[in-house]
Each structure stands twice: as structure tokens, then as C-alpha cells.
Image (cartoon, grey):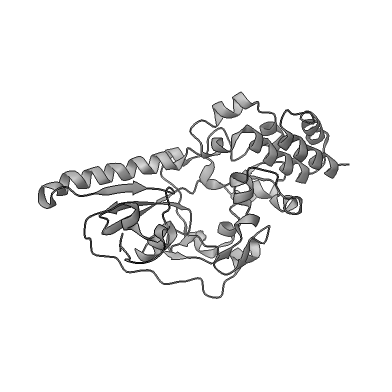
Amino acid sequence: MAAHVSPAGPKRALPEALVPGTQSIITVRMNYRPAGAAEEALSDKTRAYISRYALGRDYHKLMRARLQKLADRMAVELTGQLGEFTQRVFTDSAPVMEVQIAQQSGLGWRGKHTLLLHREAGSYFFLGEIYSALPLPPDAPVTDHCGSCTACIDSCPTDAIVAPYQLDARRCISYLTIELKNSIPEPLREGLGNRIYGCDDCQLACPWNRFAPLTREADFLPRHELDIARLVGLFAWTEDEFNERMAGSAIRRIGHDRWLRNLAVALGNAPSSQAVIEALKARENDPSPLVREHVAWALARHQ
């Protein structure tokens, strides 16, 4: 799908400023939804919940490689007709307004949870773009089909969707477990439940995701049984084990300390048991102050 380039707006909305010569943006999506009931993992508080997109290999490299292959093929096919032309690929990188561009190109509409939605594909997909100097005809935008539904807003565990189409990232579990480098604010820890990397609640609640197809990409399927892993087991991983098992995964970029931080919060929210308490006590004196703080909070929850 293609979108025209707008001549005005902030720098991140000016493709010409990012890639000089850009006349069109080709947008694509790639389904990542794995099989299995996510709700089961959420309801069993002894299990770790990882956002469905992160269960397999890191999508950045895979999508970028596929997009580059497409761009290279276009160059081979069209250079003889049009001469040399500029194009550059992106996927969740650089200051690219992916959802807005995808909406303008007809790939879907922005839902009230701020994610892109499509009638047949739901929202379980990654987005990618090719900024091109080709003057392609634009596709028509898709209209909003959320109606009066507020399922995504009502489902958010930390009330991060403060109004339709408005997200307070500071309260979002995806931000708290992935982007935040410091301590997770105590008032929000209980809301994390057993979510240790990202959150899918707004997507799980969305009626349009009943139609979302399963991925056909083997690299997006769960690795190391992360879709059924237990909190206690993951909390016992050493840093070497974490780095080895998370090689090629988006999860690895948060590092071992934040991985343990997130798991400590989830163990604090888990049902009290000897196994949970022993696992936490084993890291009471962890070298990382960040881990020790969250372990102390979790242990206090089980007293």
C-alpha cells in the first residue's frame, strides 16, 4: 500500500527531511500472532506472561531484510525504466510515524488503544515502510470502525489509555517492563500482574482480533517454551543463561537486571508458596540494587 508525502508538518512527519527525494511511502504489515490461548497464561499467576510479539525471534532484522529484498528487486526491475532512484527501508526505527502513515495508505485505522486495526487482520502485526522516490499512486485511507466500543480502554490493567486514542506511556506496562530503565513505580506494580515483558490486554479485549490470523512465519513462533514458562524457573536464570537463551530475541535488549526486576514484581503478585518465597530470598543479596529493591518489595507482599 502506498501513501503520498505531505509537504508540511513536524520533522518526523516530513519524509523528505528523513530521506531526501522521497515521493511515496510503501507500507506493509506482517502477522505475528502465535497459536495458543494468551488468556490462559494471564490467568495462571505462577506463569510468566510475555507479549505475543516477543515470544519468537526479533522482528526488526527479519522485516528489515524482507523489505530490503523487496526494495532491491524494485530497483532491478525499475532502474532501466526510470534511472537511479532513492529508497530506504524502516521497521520500528528512526522518527517514522508508522501508524499514521499506514492509516493514510489504507492498511487500517488507528484504534482507541492507538494501535493500527484492520477488519480481517486485527492488530497482531508488525509494520514496515519503504521510503521511495517513485511517484506511486496513493491508496485510499481506511475509515474508523471502533464505533462506541471501549473494550480496550476498560481492559487496561494500569489505566494507561486515559481517553480514546490517548495513551499515557508512563503508565503503560509495555513501557514499564521494556523501556523504563529504573524502578517501576510502586503504585503500578500490582497492575503488572504476571506480565514480565510487554502487555496485550487491549488487543485481547478488542473484538476485531477475533478475526486475526495466525502467523505463518516460523521465526515468530515461541522459543524456549516462553509461552508456558513458570516465573520461578525464569527467575533462576543466570546472566549467561539469559544472554544465551534470549540471543536473537527482542527481550535480550532489556538486559538481565531488568529481566529480574520484572520477574520480581510478578513473583510479588503471584500466589504465596514456598517455591516463590525461596526463589525471591535467593536473590535478596543480588549485586544489582535495582533487583534487590524489587525483591524486597515482593517478599514484603508474602509476609
Q: In this view, does 67 lie to the left or right of 157?
A: left
User: Where 114 sits versus 186, above or below?
Assistant: below
Task: Give 285 or 109, whichever is nearer the viewer.
Answer: 285
Q: In which quarter of the image is the C terminus?
A: top right
Q: Position of residue 290 (x, y in %)?
A: 71, 37
Tell me which residue sits at (75%, 51%) in the image: 190
Q: Is residue 201 left or right of residue 83?
A: right
Task: Give 295 or 170, whichever is nearer the viewer.
Answer: 170
Q: Can residue 50 be seen in this view?
A: no
Tell me which residue sits at (76%, 50%) in the image: 186
Q: Is residue 233 left or right of residue 23?
A: right
Q: In which quarter of the image is the N terminus?
A: bottom left
Q: Position of residue 42 (x, y in %)?
A: 66, 49
Q: Can residue 301 be seen in this view?
A: yes
User: Where 183 sits versus 166, above or below?
Assistant: above
Q: Position of residue 250 (x, y in %)?
A: 51, 39
Q: Residue furthest right?
A: 303
Q: Position of residue 286 (x, y in %)?
A: 74, 29
User: Where 136 sits versus 196, above or below?
Assistant: below
User: Where 239 sits versus 206, above or below?
Assistant: above
